[in-house]
Image: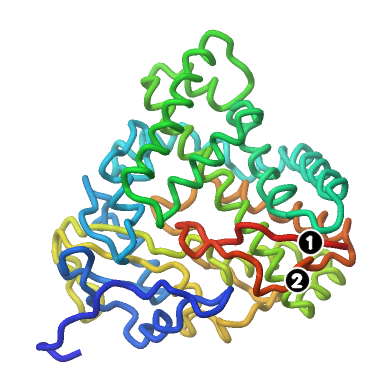
Amino acid sequence: MSGTEEPPFGMPYRRETRYDPPAALLELQDRPLRRIRYYPDGVEGWLATGHAESRRILADPRFVMGERFLHSPTDLPHVFVSISEQVPPGFFLFFDPPEHTRLRRKVTGVFTVKRMKELEPRIADIVDGCIADLRAAGPGADLVREFALPVPSLVICEMLGVPYADRDAFQRNSADMLDLARSIEDRNKSMAELFGYLAALVPAKRDEPGDDMLSALAADDDLHDVEAAGIALILLVAGHETTANMLGLGTFALLEHPDQLARLRAEPDLVPTAVEELLRYLTVPHNGVMRIAKEDVEIDDDVIRAGEHVTVVLQAANRDPERYERPSELDLGRDAHGHLAFGHGLHQCVGQQLARVEMRIAFAKLFAAFPDLRLAVPSEDIPMRVEMNVYGVHTLPVEW
């Protein structure tokens, strides 16, 4: 780009296909770190689409969440603009150290590989129950409603100590929070309602504690009640939204790649590798990760100035041909380690090991239980979550 040419507005986000990032976005990878103009006022910032550049930015403590994101990489009422204006106490996703460190430390011990291994039998029971519900609903049932959404919702509700009977309200509010077609005011209202619901549970947990995370947070003398509720808000929303969409979209992708599904059925030991490849290939957090430079940072031949916004596009980084051979192909035998579907660095998803265990068990049991699982409607009739901050399918009617 010449010195007189204005950078383009924003990042391309309108998809042409179900599984691939926008073609115009992938075309930007010839320059994996580039200038763009942000909405709404055209202020200049940066877009990272390369794997190495994205990983470097996410690992660098000089790129921070900051107090507020004032600009958006898309012309949608962006979630970062929305939530950063009214961040609840304890919602450490949008905090920087040392506060981020103090709050995140309260839950990291719960999500260790060892602890997730101990939870496997209970997760398997939950998956079996949801498979029974799917079968009882009969051919033509919506796999999202009967399986993909209840599996992670039941798991995170049990871990947190949130009544599963309240799922309709928290699922609706969390979905509305991430719906980029809704106004910022509506999304903030949904977040406030969900936060208020959790805040009301905290004193009740202190009075009658259980063997759950919310009880432990309520009993922590280092946390205010509202901080405990804010931590629970992150875990509840992230704990079911991303995994539910990976289960729904992942099933859809496998049904549309019958050669890969046949390989998975023939090689059950391939499931862990397959899950990592599905995470890389689909990358459901598809609208970018925002950071602000707190000081000048030099990356190769570019200098990102203090105060400038940077958007790291995970779905583009995971399709970087410099990192992965044939990145636009779904290959369940691929070594997809190092993918950025869970982010990277300080803010990497705290529940990633839980998500992995849920997906490994759910995919293995689902395709074993339904050896002839197939779509009940033409694939082009499946409604995609293009307007959501977490990509996926709204519904997935299946038969067997």
Q: Give the numbered dot on residue 398.
A: 1
In the rendered image, which quarter contains the N terminus? bottom left
Label 2: state its secondary structure: helix
In depth, the one of 175 and 365 nearer the eye is: 175
Secondary element at image label 1: strand
Q: Mark 2 — residue?
A: 255
Q: Looking at the image, is 333 positioned above or below residue 91?
A: below
Quarter of the figure with the C terminus: bottom right
Left or right: residue 82 versus residue 219 is left
Residue 97 in percent (x, y) is at 29, 42
Residue at position x 30%, y 59% in the image: 60
The front one of 274 and 247 is 247
- Residue positioned 87% across, 50% down in the render: 135
Cβ–Cβ under 8 Å for marks 2 and 1: yes
| Figure quadrant of residue 215 | top right
In the picture provided, is 312 more to the left or to the right than 301?
Answer: right
- 198 or 101, nearer to the observer: 198
Residue 27 vs 173, above or below: the answer is below
Which quarter of the figure has residue 189? top left
- Whether residue 105 sits left or right of residue 109 in the image: it is left
- x%, y% of residue 331? 68, 78
Give the vertical position of 138 relative to 108 (above or below). Answer: below
Residue at mark 2 to residue at mark 1: CA–CA distance: 10 Å
